[in-house]
Image (cartoon, rainbow, N blue to C red):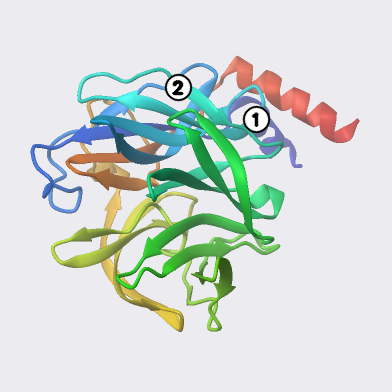
């Protein structure tokens, strides 16, 4: 590890936070309204949050996210309850021995499931909720593979597609791989990778309908990780392949926020009803707890 990278790792790591907007109606979206402001959700000294997903249960809204533990220097899965004027405490729901992020959450037959990014473990697995919102257990190993930001889409015929990205030794986020569920197993699309483009491959949230179009959010990682948000119109998705075309790109400086802060990145977008959520990259700054965690991690690695 070069000296400059070591100093950055020890003293000035990346930091993210989430931001929420409660709109007046369900038709308002970041795609047609960048005037009304998002409210930045404050992180804690120990945890920062990224990859936020929305859930509504019993009339209440919840954010599920990666809760990055500065002391342990890895991502855990957490949640907090939100309203249009208040945000609950961060609560941890699941921890693995390695980094977890992108908690793709969905409901099936009255049960919630999460498929997190677990690339560092070399596997894709599913969690089952045994007591909403804070009791979860590992239920199924879906694949032994290095996949990031897996996004699930169910078509009109009830087929579950897993839109993901396979990471190789280059560690470049430039491809889209497609899997589909059949007889309880994941099968790989024969034409993988179905897309190769660092500027709009990596997933950035759930697919959603907008003005009669199916939209897939993605990250622009061409020049920097999580630099911009892309919105792509999905033209077709089947067991044979996947096609989409660019619809709109949004930079972080286009987003109006309630905090006058120099955010430098954006890489997740989700919506539910009239609520939207994004995450934002904060310029690197010192955190004592994070530095202690980095030293502990380096000591464990070498000794």
Q: Percent from the top left, x then y, of residue 133?
A: 43, 30
**Camera-nearest residue between 262 and 281:** 281
Q: Which mark is on residue 189? A: none
Quarter of the picture holding the C terminus: top right
Q: Is residue 215 above or below residue 106?
A: below
> Mark 1 or mark 2: which is in front?
2
Q: Is residue 281 above or below residue 108?
A: above
Residue at 25% across / 66% down in the picture? 214
Mark 1 is surrounded, within 10 Å at the Cα level, by few (under 14), some (14 to 19) or many (20 or more) other residues, namely many
Q: Could you give the CA–CA distance between mark 1 and mark 2, rounded to whole angstroms?
A: 17 Å
Quarter of the picture holding the N terminus: top right
**Camera-nearest residue between 56 and 123:** 56
Q: What residue does disc 2 label?
A: 90
Q: Is residue 273 above or below residue 61?
A: below
Looking at the rendered structure, the secondary structure element under dot 1 is: loop
Q: Percent from the top left, x then y, of residue 293?
A: 69, 23
Mark 2 and mark 1 in contact (Cβ < 8 Å)? no
Does the rendering let one see residue 269? yes
- Picture quarter containing residue 184? bottom right
**Camera-nearest residue between 168 and 156:** 156
- Picture quarter containing residue 98? top right
**What residue occupies the far front of the structure in this picture?**
109
Residue at 60% across / 24% down in the picture? 70
**Camera-nearest residue between 252 and 195:** 195
Q: What residue does disc 1 label?
A: 73
Judge from the rendering whether residue 118 lies leftward or rightward of residue 3; answer left or right.
Answer: left
Looking at the rendered structure, the secondary structure element under dot 2 is: loop
- Picture quarter containing residue 84? top left
N-term-proximal mark, 1 vs 2: 1
Judge from the rendering whether residue 149 lies leftward or rightward of residue 250; answer left or right.
Answer: right
Does the rendering let one see residue 283? no
Q: Percent from the top left, x then y, of residue 291?
A: 66, 21
């Amino acid at each position: 590890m070069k000296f400059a990278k070591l100093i950055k790792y020890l003293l000035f790591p990346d930091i993210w936070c989430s931001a929420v907007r409660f709109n007046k109606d369900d038709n308002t979206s970041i795609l047609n309204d960048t005037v009304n402001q998002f409210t930045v959700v404050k992180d804690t000294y120990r945890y920062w949050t990224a990859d936020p997903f929305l859930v509504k249960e019993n009339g209440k809204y919840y954010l599920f996210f990666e809760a990055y533990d500065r002391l342990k220097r890895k991502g855990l899965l957490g949640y907090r309850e939100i309203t249009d004027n208040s945000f609950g405490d961060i609560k941890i729901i699941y921890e693995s021995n390695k980094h977890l992020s992108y908690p793709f959450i969905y409901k099936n037959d009255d049960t919630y499931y999460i498929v997190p990014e677990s690339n560092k473990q070399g596997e894709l697995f599913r969690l089952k909720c045994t007591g909403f919102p804070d009791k979860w257990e590992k239920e199924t190993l879906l694949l032994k593979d290095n996949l990031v930001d897996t996004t699930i889409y169910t078509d009109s015929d009830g087929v579950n597609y897993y839109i993901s990205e396979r990471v190789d030794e280059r560690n470049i986020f430039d491809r889209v791989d497609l899997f589909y569920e059949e007889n309880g197993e994941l099968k790989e699309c024969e034409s993988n990778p179905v897309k190769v483009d660092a500027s709009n491959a990596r997933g950035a949230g759930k697919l959603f309908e907008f003005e009669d179009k199916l939209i897939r959010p993605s990250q622009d990682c061409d020049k920097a990780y999580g630099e911009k948000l892309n919105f792509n119109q999905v033209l077709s998705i089947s067991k044979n392949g996947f096609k989409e075309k660019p619809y709109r790109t949004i930079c972080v400086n286009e987003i109006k926020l309630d905090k006058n802060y120099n955010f430098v990145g954006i890489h997740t977008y989700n919506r539910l009803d009239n609520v939207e959520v994004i995450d934002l990259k904060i310029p690197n700054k010192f955190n004592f707890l994070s530095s202690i965690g980095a030293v502990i991690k380096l000591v464990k690695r070498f000794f």
